[in-house]
Image: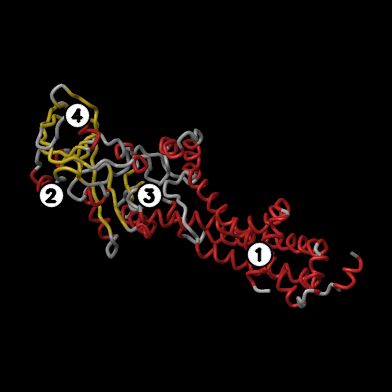
């Protein structure tokens, strides 16, 4: 008999006792699931982080100084120091000054944040104008009275018409300043707005993604993780309100030339190295900087995950060994139950080799079926983990290498587990069996 015929016989034997077959497959299925699950999360997250690096703040390093009376503030001269430190790397640096204010248009008034910056802001933040233009170097140099509205600010101040070339009045301390709108920023998606500087999902983001499966404890869990990692709590909500008004940096002057934030954009694969260089360059200038950046991608690319790989391999081999023992015992039982079938096949002309091939095929089919069922189970677990994972860049990928390894190990396991039952079946004397029948 050929391979196809033996495979059909094996499938019929499995379907004849479905409950027993299901229980037998558990060891091999969970071994494959354990092999696939962590790799699916790891590969999917790395791919997701690199592809959507700007969206999940995996390329940006916001920098600010500790707010202490004796601590020196960040200034525009620090931009040059950072540029020198990052020489030879891909980077852009943008200074920011923020001021809480009010914006007025006719009878409409809204609270807003004035964001003083320069022409490099769109490149650094990956946040571009959807209408009109952004601020230019000439606007900053000439202190031009122009502004760019974020999407929600434009909708609230100009609900029924285009804001381009219209005037907006903003409050600067005791003064009122009239600005011409030259652009409107693009609207960002909900997930992007709900991702903080460290790559954590905020609570409202998870509620949107999980729908009715609301995760009430996520916010507290994120706080605990940040506390354990020594991450300072910083208010960066102005970056996600969509209600800011962008103005030239020179319109928000300061006597000490200080800035509130320096945002650095760099290669996501070099973000930890870039953060170290920035830290060293500012400390050398007697500054005490706070650096905020996405820590998940560096963790994925670090050697720390080797422990995870070793643990996964150990669990995989353990489940595989248990599955092999169960398959061997069940197939020995199957040989005892199928004495008559084996004897009839021998009388009809089947050789010992044919009987061995039949049971080896059954063992391989049984283990491969278990592995094929375990792979989607592992991917399903990875998907569920990504829903509840507090890191925004967590995703799911198809770990082709691990899947192939699981299938190859299943074939080897099926062959090894079926050797003893196959030999016992081949050595049965058909005459003695039929006489006893």
Assign the N terminus to one quadrant of the image.
bottom right
Q: Secondary structure at mark 2?
A: helix
Task: Tell me the CA gap for discs 1 and 3.
Answer: 57 Å
Pointer 2: what residue?
137
Q: Is residue 30 above or below residue 150?
A: below
Mark 1 surroundings within 10 Å by alpha-carbon count, few (fewer than 14), some (14 through 19), many (20 or more)? some
Farthest residue in the right direction?
436
Q: Secondary structure at mark 4?
A: loop
Q: Which-is-in-front pick, marks 4 and 1? A: 1
Pointer 4: what residue?
159
- Comes first in the chain, label 3 or label 2: 2
Mark 2 surroundings within 10 Å by alpha-carbon count, few (fewer than 14), some (14 through 19), many (20 or more)? few
Assign the C terminus to one quadrant of the image.
bottom right
Q: Nearer the viewer, residue 195 or 96?
A: 195
Pointer 1: what residue?
8
- Comes first in the chain, label 1 or label 3: 1
Q: Is residue 117 left or right of residue 355?
A: left
Q: Which-is-in-front pick, marks 1 and 3? A: 1
> Disc number at residue 179?
none
Task: Please provide percent x and percent y for residue 66.
Answer: 35, 42
Pointer 3: what residue?
293
Task: Please provide percent x and percent y for residue 55.
Answer: 33, 48
């Amino acid at each position: 008999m050929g391979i196809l015929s033996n495979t059909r016989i094996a499938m019929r034997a499995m379907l004849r006792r479905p409950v027993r077959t299901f229980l037998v497959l558990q060891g091999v299925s969970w071994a494959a699931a354990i092999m696939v699950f962590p790799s699916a999360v790891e590969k999917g997250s790395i791919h997701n982080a690199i592809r959507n690096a700007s969206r999940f703040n995996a390329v940006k390093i916001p920098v600010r100084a500790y707010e202490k009376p004796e601590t020196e503030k960040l200034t525009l001269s620090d931009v040059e120091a950072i540029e020198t430190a990052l020489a030879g790397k891909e980077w852009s640096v943008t200074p920011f000054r923020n001021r809480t204010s009010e914006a007025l248009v006719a009878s409409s008034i809204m609270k807003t944040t004035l964001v003083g910056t320069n022409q490099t802001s769109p490149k650094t933040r990956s946040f571009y104008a959807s209408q009109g233009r952004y601020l230019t170097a000439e606007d900053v140099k000439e202190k031009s009275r122009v502004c760019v509205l974020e999407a929600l600010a434009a909708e609230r101040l100009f609900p029924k018409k285009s804001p381009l070339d219209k005037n907006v009045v903003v409050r600067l301390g005791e003064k009122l300043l009239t600005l011409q709108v030259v652009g409107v920023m693009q609207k960002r998606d909900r997930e992007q707005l709900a991702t903080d500087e460290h790559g954590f999902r905020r609570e409202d983001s998870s509620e949107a993604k999980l729908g009715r499966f609301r995760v009430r404890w996520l916010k507290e869990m994120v706080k605990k993780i940040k506390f354990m990692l020594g991450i300072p709590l910083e208010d960066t909500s102005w970056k996600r309100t969509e209600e800011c008004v962008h103005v030239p940096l020179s319109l928000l002057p300061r006597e000490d030339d200080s800035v509130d934030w320096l945002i650095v954009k760099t290669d996501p694969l070099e973000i930890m190295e870039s953060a170290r260089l920035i830290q060293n360059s500012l400390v050398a200038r007697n500054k005490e900087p706070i650096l905020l950046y996405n820590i998940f991608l560096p963790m994925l690319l670090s050697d720390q995950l080797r422990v995870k790989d070793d643990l996964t391999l150990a669990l995989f081999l353990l489940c595989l060994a248990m599955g092999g023992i169960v398959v061997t015992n069940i197939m020995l039982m199957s040989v005892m139950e199928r004495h008559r079938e084996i004897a009839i096949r021998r009388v009809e002309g089947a050789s010992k080799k044919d009987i061995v091939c039949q049971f080896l095929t059954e063992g391989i089919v049984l283990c491969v079926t278990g592995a094929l069922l375990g792979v989607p189970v592992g991917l399903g677990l990875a998907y569920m983990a990504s829903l509840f994972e507090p890191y925004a860049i967590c995703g799911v990928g198809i770990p082709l290498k691990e899947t192939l390894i699981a299938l190859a190990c299943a074939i080897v396991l099926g062959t090894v587990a079926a050797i003893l039952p196959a030999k016992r079946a081949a050595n049965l004397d058909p005459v003695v069996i039929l006489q006893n029948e």
